[in-house]
Every structure is written in structure tokens, then in C-alpha cells.
Image: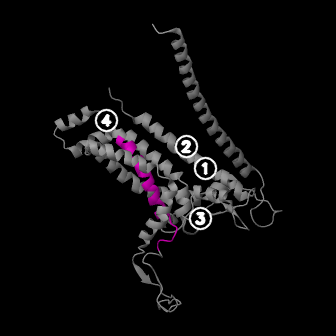
Amino acid sequence: MPRARSTRLRWFRERGILAGLVLCGVATVAVTGLIVFILARETSTFFGQALTPTHGDPARTVEVSLGDFFGDLTWSPNAPVDARFGIWPLIGGTLQVAGVAMAFAIPFGLMSAIWLSEYAPARVRAVLKPVLEIIAGVPTVVFGFFALTVITPALQMRFWQVPEIDPSTGQPLLGADGQPLTAPLLADWVSGYNALAAGLAVGVMCLPIVTSLTEDALRAVPRALREGSYGMGASRFETATRVVFPAALSGVVAACLLAVARAVGETMIVAIAAGASALALSDRGPGRLLALGQDTQTMTGFLVQVFKGDIAHGGVAYQACYAVALTLFVMTLFLTVLGGVIRQRFGQRYE
């Protein structure tokens, strides 16, 4: 029989651990609720009151409505005259980066996960899986610097220099030393800051998320399904793609949606490599989204611009950051909830 003293100590220890876990959960919910409350309060101020402009006559006031925010195709909060606050250029820039990232991360991530789950030897998998998780822990500022200094020059084909031509004369431009000036081959198509390089860097960052979570979902499929498929004469590839992958589809979709949410909310990479010019959707419409080689601005990029001090505190442009942040929060929350619903609705349970 255990002694009474040890029993009481164990009881207090267990109650202390339980209280600590409850406190952590309550603190998480409270912090999240406080963030949502502040965003909602400041956003209502942005839409519900007349605010002073960032530039121009301080006696003049600017009022922004929901119709202006969601119905306008121009984002120019710093304009001294006729500032406009249409959110769609920032959403378009966010979709540019996220689209490029998912076009890279999802195919390569799914193929890597299938190989790790169905083909890789146990020793190889034991080494590569931790390496992927280490990549996921690399600071995003490193990916941003990599995009700016490696990916962008590679996209411009900087190793292939061509003479710069004077458009008025058609003759090569000469430098101070009399030698022809040169530029990278694709410098006109890919600018120094661009959505394509930022999206590829975000894709590299999201690749471990897609690979690791998808591999976990594939490994959770019972061995009996594989053996049954082999017994029917299916090859390893047919088993992986027609039996195992469909059985784990809910987990795969949830992993992809989580990666999309991560790409949408990425900050440092786009702040370093994407640029700070909002898309001119009013000029070329949705076709402007395909100009991936030019600079763009995402919602998170605008928030960085605000809190770096580039926009004066208290003006209408500063208050706009709360409306942008709330929009971003709703988008990521929708993706997270959608992933959970898909996992619950289509997840398969095995005995």
C-alpha cells in the first residue's frame, strides 16, 4: 500500500499539472480574443469616423466606407489628394505570392511525401524527416534574403549579360569609360523586387509543411489496405496512387490548406523580396495578376510598411492597417476552419 504522504503529493502534483494546462488554454483563448477585439474596434473606427489624411491639408477629413474598401480597385493610401483604399490590389498581391508558392510546394511536397511513405527505406526516412523539420524552422528572413540575392538574379539570368540599347537611336549605351553598358538578359521582365521570386521562396518554406503532414497522413493508412492491393496484383505505384493516397485524402487536403494559410500570412519574405507597389488592377484588371516578374505588395507587406514608420501615426492610412489585418485574419481563419471541416467530414476511420 502506498504511503499517505506520497499519495497526497501525487494528488497535488497532478492537480498542479492540470491547473497549468487549463491556464495555458485559457491564456491562449484570451490573447486571441483580445487581438480580435482590438482589430474589430480599430476597424470600426476606420470605417465609422472621419479621419485626417496622412498628407495634405490636416484640416480636411477622409471617410472610408465598406463600399470603398471592397468595391474599389485602387490602393493609394499615401496619395496627398484623392487617397483610395480598395483592398483588392493587396489581396491580388497576396494571391500572386501564395499561388506561386503553392504551385511549387504542393506538387513537390506530395511527390516527396509519397516517396518517403511508400518507397524510401526506413533508414533514409529516419534521416530525411528530421531534415525537413529543420528546414521548416529556418527563420523566414533567411528565405527572404535568399530570394533577393539568389532566386531573383537566377530568374533575370544575370549570368547572361546583353548590351543596353538606347531606344531613341538603337545604338548601345556607353558608360563613362566608353565601354557598352550591359544588363541581365531578362532584367526587363523580372525586376529587382518581384512576386515570382518571393513566391518561390515562400514555396520552399511551405514545402516541409506539405511533405511532413502528407507523409504522416499516408503512414496512418493501415497496412492491410496495401497488402490487399498487392494481393490483387497491383504494383507499388498503383497501390500508392489509387489506394493509399485516396484513403489519406482528407489529411492531404488539410495539409495543403494549412500550407496555403501559412503562405497567405507570410511577412518577412514578401517584405524583403516582393516590393512595395500595390497592383494597378484599375489599369489592366485581373490580367495584372499574371505580371509575376514585377514588384507587388501583399497585405502583410503593407503592415510591415506601416509599422516600420513609413506612414505617420494616427492618420487614415495608419488606421487602414487594422482593416487590412482583420481581412487577413478572416482569410486565414477561413482556411484553417475549412481544413478542420474537411478533415472531420471526409476523414476515414479504421479499426
Left or right relative to 207: residue 127: left
CA gap, disc 1 and disc 4: 37 Å
**Element type where label 3 sits in the image:** loop
Q: Residue furthest right?
A: 59
Q: Residues within 10 Å of mark 1 (few under 14, many from 20)?
A: some
Amino acid carrying label 3: it is Ala
* Numbered badge on residue 333: 2
Q: Is residue 312 magenta?
A: no
Picture layout, residue 172 above or below residue 118: below
Give the labeled residue for mark 4.
221
Cα–Cα gap, marks 2 and 1: 10 Å
Indicate which disc, 2 or 1, sits on the residue closer to the N terminus: 1
Disc 3 to disc 2, C-alpha distance: 25 Å
- Which amino acid type is marked by label 4? Val
Residue at 51% x, 40% y is 337
Q: Nearer the viewer, mark 3 or mark 2?
A: 3
Q: Is residue 194 above or below residue 13?
A: below
Earlier-in-chain disc, 1 versus 4: 4
Looking at the rendered structure, the kind of residue marked 2 is: Leu
User: Magenta stretch?
Assistant: 189-215
Please name the residue that numbered disc 1 is placed on: 327
Q: Residue furthest top?
A: 1
Cα–Cα gap, marks 2 and 4: 28 Å
Residue 190 appears at what percent x and percent y? 47, 71
SS class, disc 4 = loop
Alpha-carbon span between mark 1 and mark 3: 19 Å
Q: Residue at 39%, 34% (x, y): give it.
A: 347
- Mark positioned earlier in the residue sequence (4 or 3): 4
Residue receiving disc 3: 276
